[in-house]
Image (tube, grey):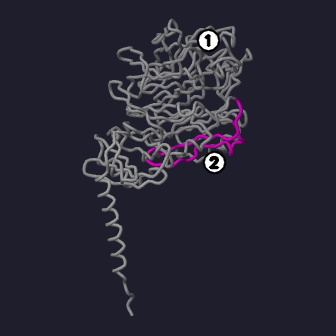
Amino acid sequence: MKPQIHIRPVISILLFWSALALSCSERLSEARSSEDCPPIFPDYKEITVPVNIAPLNFRLEPGGKCKVLFSARDYQFTLSVSDYVNIPLTKWRHLLEQAQGDKVTVTIYTPDQDGWIAHRPFHWHISPDPIDSHLVYRLIEPTYANWNEMGIYQRELSSFSEKEIIANDKTGHNCMNCHSFNQGDPDQMVLHMRKINPGTILIKDGSVVKLETKTEYTISNFVYPYWHPSGKDIAFSTNNTQMSFFEANSKLIEVYDLYSDIVLYDTDKNEVYTSPLLSDKEQLENFPVFSPDGKKLYFCSCPRVDSLPQDFDRVKYRLCSIDFDVDRQEFASKVDTLVDLVSEGKGVSLPSISPDGRYILCSVASSGCFLSWDKESDLYLYDTRTKSFKPAKALNTDYSESYTNWSSNSRWIVFSSRRLDGVYNRPFIAHIGENGEIGKPFLLPQKNPDFYQDLFKAYNLPQLVKGAVKVNPHEIAETAKSAVSGQVKFRKDGHVPSVSGKSGNKSEVN
């Protein structure tokens, strides 16, 4: 006997749901209009987003049932919401394809005793400029010197997939920090391990090695890195860093350097070299950044202050540059000062340059170098063509903004901000046009909008990367726990800094 196929019940079910959907659509078309637009979290109203971003899920504030209509050109769909707006990935991608170079209109409908209220719609402007595929960051509790669990993770930006690069449960619960990539290349990465299993992990040319970077002529182990675009050299600061806590000040903490230099590490020869202009004992040189063509090194510098921490407010950095010949591995004989805000009572720190070389984003505050905890810290934009230096007003709030990074096409900025609660750094993304127009920043999307409220870790040093880091976490961990692969040597015929390891200076803050 052939099996019987019961078609009639299936057709009945399909007809029922079709009728229900049509009924809902008809009721929404009869909704009364309101000029109010309910508050939502995250605040995704009137933002510009890349065409390859993950769904912008959100919830109403303070919550409640609603329906949300998404429309772009000839495509639209409606979601019924009881908790939060969870946009199906397939529908989302089709929506972005339809709206590329245009906009998505989002209309929220809320019920009342007379039916539905159609609130004033808002829009998502869908830029054809793609963003790099992954974001790499450290997750750590927002403490000052102690920690328990931390790790470096990578997030696929077109979805909600997050994977571990390395977590400290594999390396003795040590500190790990200062991850950096060469021009967003996931196959060229450097990071530091501190305290337990200490050393610098270098990932390059398919290998993972552990380096001992303290030499008798350098202040400390390598600290803040930046790759030369050739991949041959990496600039590092070396720092004798301290921190002090305040009892009666709007600031909680001040992080400062007693000494700091900038050195270059030759990855082929395992050698360190520097210039007298980058290792002046009367100056603090910090935060190196190479120009995209590799011919210039940008950095921050200020006169060294003897009376620290008492005179911490005298530490005001300037943005400087020095020409560099990569073939001869030599620096020019003079330093150019690009931005000096000392007369305005401010200093410049934490620069990052766009890959097209046009703009440099910096953190600006009244004093200090490590501005992540400084509520005064705002972001400013330096134009390398016009030499203008202006506040990036679209990015700034009354809370700390810091740690900027650029997409490989120079059209997207990612930065850290404590604006949500004043405590936890969260990653925000903003579009920047060719002429420096910056759009409203948006919070990195999560599947559940309550994700950030439930996460008791801060996002540290967000870095946009052009692909996934493929090195296995266990390979990094085994390398970290092994003996160092090589002791970095100071170049014998090179300039020797006047403040060196022989003086006993050591970096004490990770």
Residue 359 image position (x, y, % from top left): 40, 23
Q: Is residue 478 left or right of residue 77?
A: right
Residue 448 image position (x, y, % from top left): 51, 48
**Amino acid type at image mark 1:** Asp
Is 490 above or below relative to 42? above
For the N terminus, the quadrant is: bottom left
For the C terminus, the quadrant is: top right
**Amino acid type at image mark 2:** His
Residue 35 image position (x, y, % from top left): 34, 39
Is 189 above or below relative to 329? below
Determine the residue positioned at 58% across, 20% down: 263
Residue 399 image position (x, y, % from top left): 54, 26
Give whichever of 344, 387 is nearer the camera.
344
Mark positioned earlier in the residue sequence (2 or 1): 1
Give whichever of 320, 143 is nearer the camera.
143
What secondary structure is marked by label 1? helix
Instruction: Please identify the residue farthest to the bottom as the structure is shown.
Output: 1
Is 8 above or below relative to 114? below
Occupied quadrant, residue 508: top right
Is residue 148 highlighted in magenta?
yes
* Range drawn in magenta: 145-174
Occupied quadrant, residue 407: top left
Determine the residue positioned at 42% across, 16% down: 389
From the image, tell me which residue sits under label 2. 474
> Depth-wise, is mark 2 or mark 1 nearer the camera?
1
What is the number of callouts on the image?
2
Q: Is residue 288 visible?
A: no
Confirm or deny contact between disc 2 and disc 1 (CB under 8 A).
no
Q: Is residue 71 left or right of residue 274?
A: left
From the image, tell me which residue sits under label 1. 313
Crowdedness near tag 2: few (<14), some (14–19) or many (≥20) residues, C-alpha within 10 Å: some
